[in-house]
Image: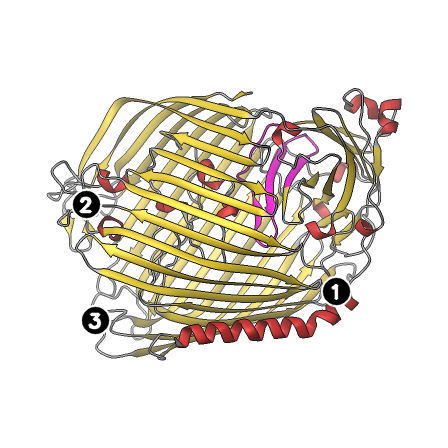
Amino acid sequence: MLSLRCFVSVILLLCAAVAAQQPVAVKERPVLAAEIGSPDIPKLETSPRLTDFEGMEPATQLARRMLKVDKFVQRDPRDGTLCSQRTEAYLGYTNRNIYIIFLAFDTEPQKIRARMLRRELIDDDDQVGMLLDTFNDQRHAYGFYSNAYGIQQDFLLTENQGFDTSFDTLWHTDAKVTSHGYMVWFEIPFKSLRFSQRSPQIWGVMLARVIARNGERAYYPQNTSRIQGTLRQAAKIQGFEGISPGRNMQFIPYTAVRAFRGLDDRNPAGERFTGKHVEPKAGLDSKIVIKDSLVLDTTVNPDFGQVESDDPQVTVNQRFEVFFPEKRPFFQENASYFSTPLNLVFTRRIVNPLYGVRLTGKLDKWAIGTLVANDQAPGKTVLEGDPLFRNNAYFSIFRLNREIGKNNSIGFIYTDRELHTNPGSFCTLHECSVGFNRVGGFDIQMKMGSNWQMNAQAVTSETRFNDGTHRAGPAYQAYVERSSRNVEFNSLFLDVSPGFEADTGFVNRVDYRRFSNFANYTFHPEGEHLLSHGPAFFEQTFWDHEHNFLGYTLNPSYRWNFHRNSFFTVVTGLEHERLRPVDFSALTRNVDYAHVNGGIDAGTQFWKWLNVNGEMDWGTATNFVPRAGGPTLAYNNNAELRATVRPTKSLTIENAYFLTRFIDRDTSLNIFTNHIARSKWNYQFTKEFSLRLIGQYVTTISNPALTTLQNTKQFNGDVLFTYLLNPGTAIYVGYNSDLQNLDPSLASTPDGLLRTRRTFLNDGRQVFVKLSYLFRY
């Protein structure tokens, strides 16, 4: 009851604060180009081509009939000033497609950053593109961008949730670099879009140009940082008549074959090797559009062999589970429909699905999302004869969201994971022991004025274990944010009860209340070298549900931003952490740990061929894996360095290095040192054909007298040839191998498998070929 009162009180305070600030926000609101009028887009008899703009000007009568846009305004680095380079865009449509041709002039064409890259990987290049808010709801938009070589990037934008880059659809580009800049031709089929059946149509449209060497982003109409939200600032383009997505059904069958060898850890008697010389596999992905608004996606026996391995993260000495984002295309696409303030849908929990069905879309003011899938992983973690053998977990997720006005919404979510089996399984993992876990609740999102937004959510869960025990509890979150060109502020209240559990989501800590605040102020001198600078401050405090203080964090910092996407940040930190016997059984009483830290963060894209950034910090931290007794306080050093090198237009080399070191305060002896080094090479022979190489080395050098961590070494290599004709039609040929310093006997020790000092054992390798083809009707 106390937590509910706190939740309601915070909501009332946030609403009062927002209401008090509304008049000021509205008064400061600038006039936008989008408010000047709604231009008509002309219907064309034939399809325009780049040749209609020979000489970087409308050279034919067809080109001159198109709608011209040329008032591009900067958002970064000088919000409100005209684009530093002349930019023109021409728009038109036919019965089947919408066309946009960009003329991106440049007074220094030799400095244009354009590379032959894999599809989607153009973030560091010069770009042109657009957002299409086809429902004109100021909430959702399609994004289509291209670099100067015609390399495509498409995504979905959902306000307050960000970009969904997993979205892939069929569209076409053509591009040409000239002595005066570059031109890009876009052809986007209406069949690749969803929109209402009204006629005439009115769409929200935002056009964009990115000039990478200046860190410049310019838009038509103006997309100012003084107003929170992008789509509310879009132009209203009208004149679409007689258009329809038509019938849209897509089927992508695939076939694959692999040979593999790896460790099998299912046997209680010990691990052993298993594998197959040839393992064929086939499956089907499909997409069916219903009434131009709803999309039914299905996958049967999916294969994700071509998906890139996770980006490196430090996982040693972590008190709570580390988050790794979803990378499988079926689960990434339209993930924003299931997003709520609390992360209740984390599809990596569906480890090994045999099938999945997803229905997403928009009906008038209602947004709908449903996802049903099974997971074969629990039944495959044990051998035949185990009560869990061949048992599947079943996931069901339902999300409903209702728009209220232009910028507010209220939503409902329900999630369910079921796994029914008898107790006594060899698998003792949490996911093997839960009979069902169900979560349901409501959330609200609101925007007030030009700069304020807030969201809140209240949910409850019920969990029943296969041994008959039961757990239940609520969780609440409230968040308010003010964002403008100079001032940014946010405040968060989070309450997760001891009994709350979300087995379909990512909630890695329970039994705590958190209150946090962040504020920063940015000065904009916009000088010859220094663009902006300013201080920032973050603080948070934790309690448990018995009102016991658990800790706090204070982080003041100062950041300088320079030309060429260069920055430098100084950070300091004070942290107090209280651990209880319930957190670590080796503790007999509550113990407090005080941390003092300092650090720096810097990066630059000064050179066309190099993008580098790094950070390092030093101070004290808690060693959660001591050899004996409870956690201890230790000296701690961390460093991270990332460098992307582009020696040619076709070769991209991404490198990353992480260092984590803990040192005993009493003896100055090393407790452990963890190194992670990763290098990814991608060579793009053509727009369709590429070769990717990834090498990653991870090692932990530990002192067995001070920690239970083992001395480990691991090297993973990955090779992938890709021929990607379009999203859906592709050929993949890949090889992966993993080496670790495991003893060939595979003997077990209290700390894990026996390790050697120098020799490596190949504990997993596979080679595969996968072919898929897109059928579109």
Query: Foreground mark, 2 or 1?
Result: 2
Position of residue 536 relative to residue 592, above or below, is above
Q: Which mark is residue 586?
A: 3
State left or right for residue 516 relative to residue 255. right
Q: Earlier in the sequence, mark 3 or mark 1?
A: 1
Q: Earlier in the sequence, mark 2 or mark 3?
A: 2
Q: Percent from the top left, x then y, of residue 389?
A: 18, 38
Task: Label 2: state its secondary structure.
Answer: loop
Identify residue for label 2.
421
Task: Label 3: state its secondary structure.
Answer: loop
Query: What is the CA distance from the residue labelled 3 to the residue labelled 1?
Result: 52 Å
Name the residue located 64 percent from the left edge and 40 percent from the top edge: 143
Question: What's under tag 3, amino acid-wise?
Answer: Ala
In terms of image quadrants, where is residue 498? bottom left
Query: What is the CA distance from the residue labelled 2 to the residue labelled 3?
Result: 33 Å
Question: What's under tag 2, amino acid-wise?
Answer: Thr
Identify residue for label 1.
524
Task: Name the residue nearer the viewer: 635 or 293.
Answer: 293
Question: What's under tag 1, amino acid-wise?
Answer: His
Name the residue located 10 percent from the left edge and 43 percent from the top edge: 269
Q: Residues within 10 Å of mark 3 (few under 14, many from 20)?
A: few
Residue 734 sits inside the magenta stretch: no
Q: Are marks 3 and 1 in contact (CB under 8 Å)?
A: no
